[in-house]
């Protein structure tokens, strides 16, 4: 494939090559078409202006299409002509050491390759070389574009959401690319990265303004006293002084000195003291910043700052120190503030420029727009944290509120802000129905070398999912889900964007690897798999009102899947999932019990030959049904506690959403039989030996009390040993067919139907 960009200048030719970019361009076009926004193109900026192809010097070059994209490898080749000195060899300049190290000079050619990864924004690359005795430094910049998001809308939405909760976190010390800072009216704490980004833009203007001040400094007349002998007195004297001088002269005394008030011009003004203070502060901040960078560069686990960047800082500081050594500032004292507004600082040439620049340096983002640039964390990192905040926002729409005293926070690490990780730094949300949620970012689940009860471990390798959601219910039960943000899309050629296969495989790993350690009744260690579901969050644009979630079937079947998530969208699929878990605040909350999460099929998948149950004594309490036409021996066996079968219509359990897995969990059956009048009682508790679905026409007289040709399906329970109740459970009044799920232990203690606690009451 030919070079995507070629530039010919008086000293070198630049060629940029990459493998086929048509797929990236097509994905970019699709992304912007979905959002109905204009497709961006590439622009190359030059500093200083550059003469290209014998055309007049240019500050930027507009290209007809976008050329530079994330996650793509580009090769750069600078071919220098004979006018450029071979010694010292031309070098590449970038703040990141690994970018500089990826280039090498050989045979008049400086060549290297760069993969931008998930770093998007403006990439600034410089070359330094010598022509005769003159050193030349040339910078060129171009914008690296994301393909799965729109820079102008999606990324701006991510920045806004993150800045609201985590101010300053998204700014990074040094990355491959920079992003222009947008205007903001939100005040920030003093943050070195922002200060340096703005100082770099303003330093040339600052130096120019101070030189102008040194050439024409502001002065004012100040009173002073000086002692003079009589022969040096000039001008009009006061009458008292004149009398003293005359008296001394008449006595022949010429040794006396006389105090005389005068005025003279002085540069020691509050305005000049202010200018000196600005110079001192800027010099100190650059020195402090440079020192910390040198320490960072020596650290073996960091070391990403290039030496050319440190040298560049020294070049920033040197002119300021030279200005500070000017004779003007030797006469100027220490700045102690301004008693009132100064017209000199607001209006006079030079002074007004320094005053404006200093205000911008103090306020960072408050007064200016797209002029300063600073490195940001990668889009993958930004997307991950935005997903955490979006889950939090969707929970707010379901009626949850945040506890003010427990909130995920930031910590300062070197020049950057980092999130505190783990459950201790989680968002804690509560709702009026008693449900409590912890939303954690990147909790670390360590290997179980010495497991403690009540914690989650990994028995193999350390696991660190992006988002961990834990819900605690009023009954004390806890349910956990995992969400993992992936700033990637599957490259499968399908029309619908999907999550990468390896990301979905990772969800299976999380659910299988994480083990909850519980204390059994005998005090021994008992292991459980606590993760109910694991889901990928990926940046796909789907028409939510026209199609369903492509992963809904897998979510329902096995509890693994994904949700498309993008800023500016309603993200309805994920919201619907959370609403199904916790209920809609605008309608009514779900019954705050954990039973509902354990009735799903995917929560009961076990190895062959095993059964999974939530309750060890789940009991079906139900009436015998109409007795007309039934065999008398069949009815008598229920009264005597000798029944062998019980059947209940499938439609009756379906009306209460009691699924097959719940019926298979039944361990006991308690049947209400007629006693006297309208009263029905339970006298025996039967063991359930088996549960299966059969057609009514297949039931015998022994099993159902009479035969029928009905093709309707029924649940047939095979009954075993019947335990007599010490105290019968009574149900009074004429009622329709009414049944419920309860516990055997509670039924043995109850006296009436109303005393029986309901299990799986969320089912109806």
Image (cartoon, rainbow, N blue to C red):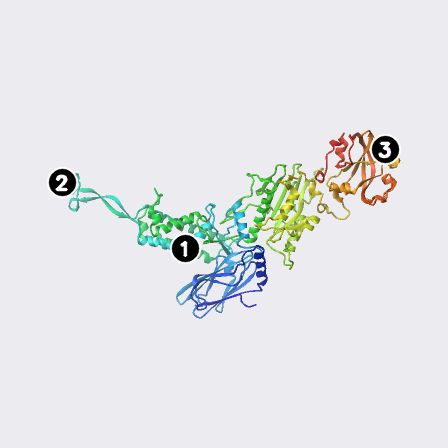
Q: Quadrant of residue 737?
A: top right
Residue at 55% from the left image edge and 68% from the top image edge? 2
Q: Looking at the image, which is closer to me, 753 or 47? A: 753
Q: Which mark is residue 248?
A: 2
Q: Is residue 624 above or below residue 211?
A: above
Q: Position of residue 588 (x, y in %)?
A: 64, 39
Could one spot residue 40 in this view of the protein? yes
CA separation in Å, label 2 and label 3: 145 Å
Cα separation, mark 2 vs mark 1, equals 62 Å
Q: Is residue 499 above or below residue 245?
A: below
Residue that sits furthest to the bottom in the current view:
82
Dot 1 crowding, Cα within 10 Å, few <14, some 14–19, many 20+: some
Residue 451 shows up from this direction: no
Residue 629 image label: none
In the picture of the structure, the residue carrying the numbered disc 3 is: 640
SS for callout 1: helix
Q: Nearer the viewer, mark 2 or mark 3?
A: 3
Q: Earlier in the sequence, mark 2 or mark 3?
A: 2
The residues bearing labels 3 and 1 have C-alpha atoms spaced at a distance of 100 Å
Q: Are marks 2 and 1 in contact (CB under 8 Å)?
A: no
Given residues 549 and 134, the one toward you in this image is 549
Neighbor class of circle 2 (other Cα within 10 Å; few <14, some 14-19, many 20+) is some
Residue nearest the viewer, comparing 452 with 410: 410
Residue 552 position, x and y percent, is 68, 50
Residue 316 is labelled as 1
Quarter of the image with the N terminus in it: bottom right
Q: Tag 2, which secondary structure?
A: helix
Q: Earlier in the sequence, mark 3 or mark 1?
A: 1
């Amino acid at each position: 494939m030919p070079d995507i960009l070629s530039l010919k200048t008086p000293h070198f030719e630049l060629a940029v090559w990459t493998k086929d970019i048509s797929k990236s361009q097509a994905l970019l076009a699709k992304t912007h078409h979905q959002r109905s926004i204009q497709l961006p193109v590439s622009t190359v900026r030059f500093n200083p202006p550059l003469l290209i192809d014998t055309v007049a010097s240019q500050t930027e070059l507009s290209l007809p299409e976008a050329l530079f994209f994330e996650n793509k490898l580009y090769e750069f080749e600078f071919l220098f002509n004979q006018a450029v000195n071979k010694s010292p060899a031309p070098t590449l300049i970038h703040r990141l050491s690994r970018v500089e190290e990826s280039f090498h000079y050989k045979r008049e050619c400086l060549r290297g390759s760069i993969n931008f990864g998930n770093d998007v924004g403006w990439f600034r690359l410089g070359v330094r070389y010598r022509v005769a005795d003159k050193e030349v430094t040339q910078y060129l910049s171009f914008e690296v574009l994301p393909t799965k998001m729109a820079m102008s809308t999606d990324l701006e939405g991510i920045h806004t959401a993150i800045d609201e909760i985590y101010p300053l976190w998204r700014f990074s010390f040094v990355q491959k690319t920079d992003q222009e800072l947008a205007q903001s009216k939100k005040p920030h704490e003093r943050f070195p990265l922002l200060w340096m980004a703005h100082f770099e833009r303003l330093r040339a203007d600052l130096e120019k303004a101070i030189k102008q001040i040194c050439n024409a400094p502001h002065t004012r007349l100040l009173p002073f006293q000086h002692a003079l002998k009589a022969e040096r007195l000039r001008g009009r004297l006061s009458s008292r002084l004149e009398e003293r001088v005359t008296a001394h002269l008449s006595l022949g005394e010429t040794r006396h000195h006389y105090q005389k008030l005068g005025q003279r011009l002085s540069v020691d003004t509050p305005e000049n003291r202010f200018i000196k203070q600005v110079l001192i502060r800027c010099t100190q901040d650059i020195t402090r910043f440079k020192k910390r960078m040198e320490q960072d560069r020596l650290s073996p686990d960091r070391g990403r700052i290039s030496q050319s960047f440190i040298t560049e800082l020294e070049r920033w500081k040197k002119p300021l120190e030279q200005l500070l050594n000017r004779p003007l500032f030797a006469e100027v004292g220490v700045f102690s503030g301004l008693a009132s507004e100064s017209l000199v600082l607001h209006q006079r040439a030079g002074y007004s420029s320094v005053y404006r620049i200093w205000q911008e340096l103090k306020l960072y983002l408050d007064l200016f727009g797209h002029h300063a640039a600073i490195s940001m964390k990668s889009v993958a990192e930004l997307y991950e944290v935005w997903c955490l905040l979006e889950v939090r926002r969707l929970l707010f729409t379901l009626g949850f509120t945040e506890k003010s005293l427990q909130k995920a926070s930031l910590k300062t690490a070197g020049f950057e802000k980092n999130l505190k990780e783990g459950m201790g730094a989680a968002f804690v949300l509560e709702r009026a129905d008693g449900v409590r949620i912890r939303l954690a970012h990147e909790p670390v689940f360590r290997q179980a070398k010495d497991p403690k009860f009540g914690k989650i471990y990994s028995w193999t390798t350390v696991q660190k999912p992006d988002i961990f959601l834990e819900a605690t219910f009023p009954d004390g039960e806890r349910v956990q889900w995992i969400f993992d943000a992936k700033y990637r899309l599957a490259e499968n050629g399908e029309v619908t964007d999907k999550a990468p296969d390896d990301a979905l495989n990772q969800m299976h790993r999380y659910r299988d690897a994480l083990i909850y350690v519980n204390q059994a009744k005998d005090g021994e260690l008992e292991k459980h798999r606590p993760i109910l579901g694991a889901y990928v969050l990926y940046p796909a644009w789907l028409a939510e009102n026209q199609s369903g979630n492509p992963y809904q079937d897998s979510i329902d079947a096995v509890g693994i899947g994904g949700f498309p998530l993008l800023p500016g969208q309603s993200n309805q699929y994920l919201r619907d999932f959370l609403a199904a878990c916790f209920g809609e605040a605008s309608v009514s909350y779900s019954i705050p019990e954990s039973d509902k999460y354990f009735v799903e099929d995917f929560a009961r998948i076990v190895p062959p030959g095993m059964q999974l149950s939530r309750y060890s004594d789940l009991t079906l309490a139900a009436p015998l049904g109409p007795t007309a036409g039934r065999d008398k021996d069949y009815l008598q066996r229920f009264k005597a506690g000798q029944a062998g079968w019980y059947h209940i219509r499938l439609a009756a359990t379906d009306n209460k959403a009691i699924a097959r897995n719940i019926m298979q969990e039944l361990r006991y059956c308690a049947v209400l039989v007629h006693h006297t009048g309208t009263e029905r009682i339970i006298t025996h508790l039967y063991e359930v030996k088996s549960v299966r679905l059969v057609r009514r026409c297949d039931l015998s007289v022994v099993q159902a009390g009479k035969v029928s040709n009905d093709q309707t399906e029924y649940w047939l329970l095979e009954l075993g040993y019947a335990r007599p109740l010490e105290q019968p459970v009574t149900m009074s009044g004429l009622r329709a067919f009414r049944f419920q799920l309860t516990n055997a232990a509670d039924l043995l203690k109850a006296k009436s139907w109303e005393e029986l606690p309901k299990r799986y009451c969320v089912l109806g």
